[in-house]
Structure formats: C-alpha cells, structure tokens
Amino acid sequence: MIDAPTMEEDARYFSPVHRGENYRKFLGRIHLAFNPKNYLEIGFRKGASLALSQAPTVAVDPNPMLPADFLDTHPHVQTVIKTSDDFFADCDVKELMGGAVDFAFLDGLHHAEALLRDFANTERVAAPDSVFVLHDCIPTDLGMTRRNPRDAFEHARNGIEWAGDVWKIIPILRKYRPNLKMCFLDAPPTGLVLVTDLDPSSTVIFDRFNEFAEEMDRLDLGAIGVADYVAGLGVRPTTSVQLRSDI
Ligand SMILES: C[S@@+](CC[C@H](N)C(=O)[O-])C[C@H]1O[C@@H](n2cnc3c(N)ncnc32)[C@H](O)[C@@H]1O
C-alpha cells in the first residue's frame, strides 16, 4: 500500500523553501553593481532594505517604523508618509526623484491589485532601462498567500511569513506584457522577481485594470499547485545572476 502524501509533500500546498541569498543580501548586491542614479522603495517599514541604498532615494509607506535617527544617518533618503496610491496621485514623482525612476523595490501592500497598480504607476515614471524588483511573488506554501496577514501567520509553514496574493500579478504580466523581461530568483523567504525591458509608454494595465483584477481574483494557487506554479517560473539561484551583464 502506498502512503498518502503528507501535507509537506503535497505539491498543491508546498514547494521547497528558497535556498538562495536572503532577499536583502541580493538587493544589496544590486545596489553595488548597478549603482543607480536614484532609488524608489514602496513599503519600507523599519528601513532594513532602505538602508542598502546609497543613491538619492524616495521611500513611501503609510505606517513607517523607522528608527528615530534613520533620516539623520541617511540624508540621501526622503520619506513620503502616504499609501503608494496617494503618493502616485499627489506627487510629481520625476520631480521628486530628480528624473525617471532608475531602480525600484516594490514591497508595499501584499495584495495583487495593489502591486499591479504600484508596478504600472512606477513603470510610467521609469525609463526602458530601469530595474524593478518585486517582492513576495514566489511563495513556497499556500498558507503564506492568504490576503489577511493574521490568517497567513496562522497557516504559513513557518508561522511568520506573509506573502499575500501578489504572486497573481506574474501570470498577468506574462500574458499581457510579454515583452517584459522577468528573472525569478530563489531569495528566501518569498522570492524576488527582477523586471527589466520596461515600457513607460505602455497603458494596457491602466486601460484594462478591472478586467485584470477580476482575472487575478479567479486565480487559485491551491488548484494550480504551489510547486507547479514555482516550477513553471524557472526560478534561478540568486548566486547565478551576473548582475553587471544580466541586468
Ligand atoms: C514587508 S514591509 C516592507 C519591508 C521592507 N521593504 C524591508 O524589506 O525591510 C511592507 C510595508 O508596506 C507598507 N504598506 C502597507 N500598505 C501600503 C500601501 N498601500 N502603500 C505603501 N506601503 C504600504 C506597510 O506599512 C509595511 O511597512
């Protein structure tokens, strides 16, 4: 008799944990290799990833928890205490950044429609050769993808990760923005996606946003299978990326 798979072995619910460099270590390598003209971070919380930037930086978060002396010790950083939607609606981003966004890390609200808007709004003020990094789009268990963080903490394999359902923007970008170049990386805990070959003139996400949001709503990771979703991305080891030639 063959034993039924345990939950840990069930490809619908789990994929092996990522084994590459921690996402912040990899981001730090990008900063050093790319030496961007400027940097935009959406969602900076305590400033751990923000602190990696040496470039003129704009950082957006409605509920920041920065150490009291952070801005004194990082004078090149300007914070905007707003949701990203309000930031893009209210601010002249290029004026604030001193030009097109060169490097962006999108790590704000972990809801698919929020990340899709952050992506489209950032791309509009970027350049074709800018580099974007998306966080949390390569979940390794179903529990961490719950939209409510408390549910995620209760159901995630390790009880501490909340990726939310931002993974859903990947099938949308692949289908409707096939010219974007995406590189999927095994950075723990929830993966990184490098996006290049951007098109600031593209309007398809804005024009068809409601349709894409409905399509994302219908995507079901349990039905796709977490392991099959991750396998379908062609995830690469972070250490295999030659930053100077690959981006
Ligand atoms: C995972 S934390 C960011 C962590 C940080 N990037 C790091 O790696 O050290 C996500 C942040 O997104 C912020 N956030 C939540 N909703 C947001 C929104 N609508 N716009 C921008 N940021 C948002 C939260 O306040 C939180 O600080």
Image: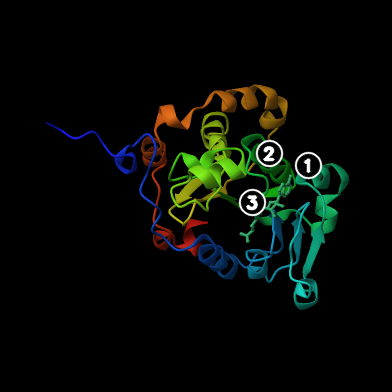
Of residues 29 and 204, the one drawn nearer to the viewer in this rendering: 29
Q: Are marks 3 and 1 in contact (CB under 8 Å)?
A: no
The correct choice, above or below, for 237 with respect to 122 in the image is below
What residue appears at the point 52 percent right and 53 percent down from the top-left corner?
Answer: 160
What's the residue type where badge 2 is placed? Answer: Ala
Quarter of the image with the N terminus in it: top left
Q: Judge left or right: residue 129 versus residue 224.
A: right
Q: Is label 2 within 8 A of ligand 1 (CB to nearest ligand atom)?
A: yes
The correct choice, above or below, for 147 with respect to 127 in the image is above
Indicate which disc, 2 or 1, sits on the residue closer to the N terminus. 1
What residue appears at the point 56 percent right and 41 percent down from the top-left corner?
Answer: 151
Q: Judge left or right: residue 36 versus residue 1.
A: right
What's the residue type where badge 1 is placed? Answer: Asp
**Would you identify the image quadrant in which residue 121 lies?**
top right
Q: Is label 1 within 8 A of ligand 1 (CB to nearest ligand atom)?
A: yes
Q: CA distance from mark 2 to mark 1?
A: 8 Å
Of residues 244 and 39, the one drawn nearer to the viewer in this rendering: 39
Q: Are marks 2 and 1 in contact (CB under 8 Å)?
A: yes
Of residues 112 and 156, the one drawn nearer to the viewer in this rendering: 156
The residue indicated by pointer 3 is 107
Q: CA distance from mark 3 to mark 1?
A: 13 Å
Query: Percent x, y for residue 91?
Result: 86, 49
Q: Judge left or right: residue 58 versus residue 221.
A: right
What residue appears at the point 46 percent right and 48 percent down from the top-left corner?
Answer: 184
**Would you identify the image quadrant in which residue 35 lies?**
bottom right
Numbered disc 2: secondary structure: helix
Numbered disc 1: secondary structure: helix
What's the residue type where badge 3 is placed? Answer: Asp
Indicate which disc, 2 or 3, sits on the residue closer to the N terminus. 3
The residue indicated by pointer 2 is 114
Q: Residue furthest front?
A: 154
The residue indicated by pointer 1 is 85
